[in-house]
Each structure stands twice: as C-alpha cells, then as structure tokens.
Image (tube, rainbow, N blue to C red):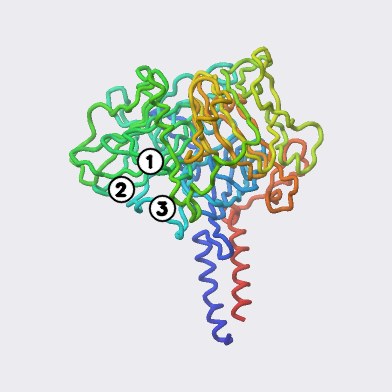
Amino acid sequence: MAVASFFSWFSVLPLVFSLALLSGYSLAGDPFISYVFEVSYITASPLGVPQQVIAINGKFPGPVINATTNYNVDVNVFNRLDEPILFTWNGIEIQGASWQDGVLGTNCPIPPNWNFTYNFQLKDQIGSFFYFPSLNFQKASGGFGPIIINNRDLVPIPFNKPDGEISFMIGDWYTQNHTALRGVLDSGNELGMPDGVLINGKGPYKYNTNVPDGIQYETVNVDPGKTYRIRVHNVGISTSLNFRIQNHKLLLIETEGRYNSQTNFTDFDIHVGQSYSFLVTMDQNASSDYYIVASARFVNETVWQRVTGVGILHYSNSKGQASGPLPVPATDVSHPWSVMNQQRAIKQNTSASGARPNPQGSYHYGQINITSTYILRSMPPTKINGTFRATLNGISFLNPSTPMRLADKHRVKGGVYKLDFPDRPPSDNTPPRLESSIINATYKGFIQVIFQNNDTKVQSFHIDGYSFYVVAMDFGNWTEDREGSYNNWDAISRSTVEVYPGAWTAVLLSLDNVGVWNIRVQNLDRWYLGQETYIRIINPEENGSTEMDQPGNALYCGALKSLQKDQLHSSATSLLDGKLNLVFSLVMALVALVSVFC
C-alpha cells in the first residue's frame, strides 16, 4: 500500500477512536457496551409518602441496559449507599462466569464508597430481563431496571417489526424502606399487606376516591393503529400481579428469552421475578384514554383493592380521560385450575429462531435420559435456634463469609460449605436446621427439579445461569408416576417459574454451565429468611474452555480479606472506569489495521 494512502487511513483513526468510545463499541471481536451505575439514595413519594429509595444515576427505576446477542457488557457500579451492595442479572445465562453473578454465595459485596465493574457476555440470548440489588432486602427500596437483548440482524423475529417498544416494571411496594422491612422479618413477623403497586416507579392514577390526590402516575403515549412491543417485569417483593390494558388484547410473544406460540389474552398473571413480552395493537377508538392495571392476585382481592397499580394509555387523538370501574381479570382465583391453565398454555414456538438462526425446537430435550431428580420442598417459615427462618428441604441457607467459588479457587480450609444438600425432603420429624449446604451436581448431567410448594402462598423459583424446560405443574404432591404427563416436545424454557400453594412444578435442566449457581425463591421475604441453596457444577476435565478464570478485579472478603487492596479514586475515576477495556480493544484493532495496510 502507498505511504500516502496509509497516512490517509491513519488520519481518520482519531475520529474512529472517538466514535467508538462515545458509542460504547469495540472494533475487536464481539462488540462492547459500557454503563456506569452511580447507586445512591434519593427521596421519592411514589405513593404520596416521602421515603428513601435506591436510585441509579439519580433515577428510579434505573436505566435500561440495551444490547444485542453476543455483546460484551461492562457495568461499573459505584456504591454511594451506607451499606454493601451487589447486583444480579435476572435471567442472564452468564456462561462459565458465576464470578459475575452478583449474589453473596459467589461474590464479595461492594463496600460503601467502592466500585466494581461487572463484565459478562450476552451469549446466545435474546429477550426481556432485569437487574436488581441482591443483598439485605435492598430490592424493596428500588435499584432495579430492565435489560433488553435484541436479535442480531441475521436472525429474524417471528412477527412484524413493532412500531415502538414500551417497558413496564410492576411490583408491590411498601412506604417503609428496606431496612425497616427487614427489621420486621428479623423480629419474626410477616410483612403484611403492601401499601400499593407501582408501575415504573409511580403510584396509581386516581381512578376512585380512595386514591390520594397528587400522586404521580405513569402515562404511556401511543398512536392509533400502531403496534407496540410491551415488555412487562414483576420486580416486586412477594405479590403475584395481573396485568391488563383496558379493551386491548395482549398477544404473548416472548417468555424470558424464548419466543412462544403466539396467544391472545385479555389479561395475564405475572409472578414475582418473571418477564414477558406482548404485542399490543392500538385498535380502539379514541373517545377516551384507557386504564393500564396491575393488581394483586391469589389474595383476598376485596381487602387488597387499594393495592392496585393504575396507569394511563393515551392515544395521540384521545378525546377524554379514562373513567369508570377498572377492568377485571378473566379468571377467578377461587378456581385455581383455570388460573393454572393460563400458565400451562405457554408453549415454545418451535419453528422460530431464538438467538441463533436455527429453530428453537431443534433441541429435543424430551429424548434425553434424566440422570438425577431433586425434589425441593418449601414450608411455611418456622423458628430455628430462636430465629424466624424459611427453608428448602428442611435447610435454611446460611451464607458463608467467604464466597464459595472464591474459597475453591484459593483452597480455603475450614468448611466454608458442604456438598450435602439432600435431593429429597426430610421426614416430618426431622427438625429444620441452618447450614451452608449446596447441591453437588455432575457436569453435563440432565436433571429434573421438582419445586414442591407446601407454603401458604404462590412462590416463584429461579436458577441463576440457566434456563429450564417447564414440563408440568399440578396440585397435590409430586410422585414419580407423574412423569408420564410431562410435555416433552414444546415446553417453554425460562429461568423463573411459579409454584402455586399446595402444588408442584417440574422442570428439566441440562447442566452445561460450570460454576456455582444460586437456586432461590424470588419472593424476597422468603429469600431473605434463607429459602435458597446453590448448585455446584465443576468440569473434572477443565482445560480453561468451560469456565472463565477469576477476574482480576475480584473483591476479597471473609477468610481472604487480607488479599484486598485499598481502592483509590480521583474525580476522573467514574469516567474512565468501564472504558479501559474498550480502549484496549480499539488499540488492538488499530494495530491489526496497520498491519494489514502496511
């Protein structure tokens, strides 16, 4: 190549460099996108009562993480709270990197006035997810926000491109902050009825005289005739919610990263920790605005009427305000079979592509031999050693002071945890106990997990780092003969599944993601009281290709706290942290360009 031509290329490199930094992309390998989260307290009044909430970059809820399949994501978290914090990525299957999972069993907390950069790849995923703080009941005060993973251009979506997108973060809410609420639980009491339901951090529209004046509510502006993709996440504490938009159909298209067979609903139950996408066409007349409703389910709805979130859908040519009674769900919770049937109707769209061009249904999970069965039974909270606790299989999990994967890496001695979590519930006369007991699983095994809910309320169960096939659910106690009723062809694959009280849900799981992964109830009160465990999956022939090594910025605590170096911050730290890896990737790309053109 001519020298002059080379220098003409070289002259544009500063511009390329600047654009790459501004856009958050890398020119080397899969793209990078970078976020800085300044986590702090602010005062807000979502239900008309001033209270302390957790904001990200001054906003409640926090910003959207918007990326595409295979993107590398950096999230640099600056902790401005007065207590440690961790963030977890609900539904994100971080491959071989439980180091980035953001739960207490795998990560040391980020101390106040420190920062930590999470780095993970959105490998082979699409869909709707969310993040939230995982420690100390903090989610009850906020700190959550949506995650959107878009299809790559070469992978088609199984519907016409929507005219726009709208995200809803719905959840029950208390006017007490998280420290007060965990004090209630620590004293051995239940939290009781929430004070309301928020939609995108806002309280209810004044649809009747019981709603106080002056509450800010969510308004969504739409154009007539257009179709919108609506992503809905239940980010609440413990209440199942029914979501509906007055006079509009909800066409269900996606369930936590999997395209499902498209089905129309007038309303839909969304349990704690779950995420869905719907297509909604604005096909009504504009004589008035329309209600957007999120109301409590599986409770005494007469008593809980004030615990209802209400927003407004506003057509651009609307002629008046919404009025009249709120729309009601089509199913009655006094008939639990009909309610369960709505969830049973969710089937995988086996002909649609997911994150890859091949159809989602090409993986024949129903033909794989099950290697192990785990029955995880939840019971109502009880006292253990004088403390109010919740259990799985009679064990209330006690988080070790040293995260388990960190303890493995540094060969910490002294019984940090035990690999003896029982695969069956104990006999009724076995007293519950506090233990750091986890599941020891076999890499590349194919297991079934039965979530048996013998508690008194609907619970949602989640497995970090994985999605699983929901093959059956029913009332009563699970028995082996129920395997004959499993859906072995088009069951939906997801990461959070509801289990009704006095019922069970069966899921199938392929253990192909090494690491130590959290299994928990998503109901925040039960999780806080110990209703969780972990599953340890180690490749005995590890050669560096199945699990990433400990990150260089890992925090140390517990038995390893002496390894932690002090952090020094300058005024420029927030701007530079989270960008350095982008700069490095860009420099490598430029070196490659120079080598090509020279």
- Quick check: marks 3 and 1 in contact, CB under 8 Å? no
Please state which amino acid type lies under the numbered disc 1: Leu
The answer to which image quadrant residue 266 occupies is top left
- Which class describes the residues within 10 Å of circle 2: few (<14), some (14-19), or many (20+)? some
Label 3 to label 1: alpha-carbon separation = 14 Å
For mark 1, what is the residue? 252
Give the structural element (helix, strand or loop) at label 1: strand
Residue at the image point whose x is 53% and y is 38% from the top:
469
User: Disc number at residue 157?
Assistant: 3
Label 2 to label 1: alpha-carbon separation = 13 Å
Please state which amino acid type lies under the numbered disc 3: Ile
Position of residue 69 measured from the top left corner of the image (x, y, whole percent)? 51, 54
User: Mark 3 or mark 2, which is nearer to you?
Assistant: 3
Give the structural element (helix, strand or loop) at label 3: loop
Above or below: residue 27 compared with residue 331: below
The answer to which image quadrant residue 220 occupies is top left
- Which class describes the residues within 10 Å of circle 1: few (<14), some (14-19), or many (20+)? many
- Quick check: marks 2 and 1 in contact, CB under 8 Å? no
Residue at the image point whose x is 43% and y is 49% from the top:
351
Label 3 to label 2: alpha-carbon separation = 15 Å
Which label's residue is closer to the chain start, 3 or 1?
Answer: 3
Position of residue 41 measured from the top left corner of the image (x, y, whole percent)? 51, 37
Position of residue 276 measured from the top left corner of the image (x, y, whole percent)? 43, 40
Location of the N terminus by quadrant is bottom right
